[in-house]
Amino acid sequence: MNTFEFSLAGAKLAGRSGILELMDDMGHALAGDPEMRMLGGGNPASVPAFETLVRERMSELLADGDVLERMLLNYDPPQGNPRFLRAFAALLQREFGWDVSPKNIAITNGSQSALFDLFNLLGGRFPGGRAKKILLPLAPEYIGYADQGLEPDLFVTCRPGIEWPQGRDGHVFKYTIDFSAVEAALAGGNIGAIAASRPTNPSGNVLTDPEVAHLSALAAAHGIPLILDHAYGTPFPGILFVPAKPFWAPHAILVLSLSKLGLPGTRTAIVIAPEAIASAVSSLTAVIGLANGTIGQQLILPWVESGQILQFGPQLIRPFYAARSLAAAGWAREYFNAAGLDWALHANEGTFFHWLWLKNLRLSSRQLYERLKARKVLTVPGDYFFFGLADDWPHRHQCLRLNFSRAPETVRAGYQIIAEEAAQASHGS
Ligand SMILES: Cc1ncc(COP(=O)(O)O)c(C=O)c1O
């Protein structure tokens, strides 16, 4: 077999990464292993009421020959479809009073691409040999960021505080931002942007409004942007179970995506950013991919123009996932208590994940993951999500991320098997 040498950047991007392993496992399970209980991956569920709307809208598009042809025949400008950009800016002005125009918006082929662009625009090597990093104020953070830097060690991450909203025996914990750690990281002067997912993948944490305001003030004081990844958040898909105000500021960059609404196949994301940054993202789209997919934008255009898109979260998507979350939490209590585990779930304030902390594990979460996979339960081991932390921390090897959005009987069976395997893998149980 030929061996080819890759560039440093190429070798870094093409090496085995957590996100590749995760997507591979999930893809194979979805495509070819019907026995596998899919509690891994970040695939959204099929939400029937939303799917009906998508089918109706697709039929409309098919019936309208002119629109269909324009949608499939033409490249859009790299920034996005001009009518879509106008409609989106108008929606944000009308509904939230944000001072944004179409020039503040850039469409990308999914938010994964948007974040790659943003992290590498704002972090990496700069003229004069300076290096800047992206500060993630609260670990654990989304596994998909971990390998996105063209330069190594792009991220600096802060260990969180841990609170027990129901007391120490309540089996519920919540991460909070340790602002002294954030300020210490900023003090070095080499941070190019602060970034966080809200709600957070994997923990289901939602940064509180005061936490976001505090981060925004720190970013402004240092003259850097605050990137908020709203893949699960406001204004859509709205998979939020606690109140959280949509946030915007002139130095904020919001990344929205159609994926968790139920349309990951359309690969469509919307970046709302200062003009210079939206324009740079469009340039990267042109260089890397020429243009964006048109289908997602055309599909949701009438919903953006009418504002209906803001109703889907509260009316269809959130109630669906809230019911799944509640049911799965019930099975966690039932099976994990019966197995005698020392366990806790992060407060599920959003997303469709439970973040399970097993405090007495004898094995690492990765070893437990392998055992569970052998029993046909796919999860995601927690250590992947703690990249960028300066020190090792036992907690990072004690967590699993569980996607509870699959069919209830699958999730229930999965939680039962996790309880059995975790009991075997724990001290004193
Ligand atoms: C927090 C977060 N950000 C971004 C993404 C990327 O999603 P997409 O590229 O489908 O928009 C995901 C997907 O799971 C995610 O969980």
Image (spheres, rainbow, N blue to C red):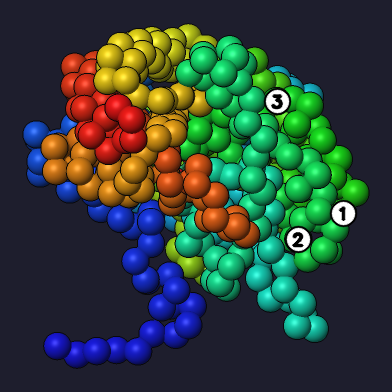
- Which labelled disc corresponds to residue 222? 1
Tell me what residue is drawn at x 22 percent, y 22 percent.
416
**Image-based side of 413 in relation to 278, left or right:** left
- Which labelled disc corresponds to residue 208? 3
- Which labelled disc corresponds to residue 191? 2
- Judged from the image, the secondary structure of the residue bearing numbered disc 2 is strand
Q: Residue furthest right?
A: 221
Q: Amino acid at mark 3?
A: Thr
Tell me what residue is drawn at x 18 percent, y 32 percent.
37
**Residue 272 position within the rendered picture, expressed as x and y whole percent measured from the top left:** 67, 42
- Judged from the image, the secondary structure of the residue bearing numbered disc 1 is loop
Q: Amino acid at mark 1?
A: His
**Residue 55 position within the rendered picture, expressed as x and y whole percent measured from the top left:** 29, 23
**Residue 420 position within the rendered picture, expressed as x and y whole percent measured from the top left:** 21, 27
Residue 211 visible? The answer is: yes
- Which labelled disc corresponds to residue 333? none
Classify 269 as above or below 208: below
**Image-based side of 44 in relation to 298, left or right:** left
- Judged from the image, the secondary structure of the residue bearing numbered disc 3 is loop
Marks 3 and 2, how far apart at CA:
23 Å
Q: Nearer the viewer, residue 268 or 241?
A: 241
Whether the residues at callouts 1 and 2 have beta carbons within 8 Å, the answer is yes
How many neighbours does mark 2 have within 10 angstroms: few (below 14), some (14-19), or many (20 or more)?
Answer: many
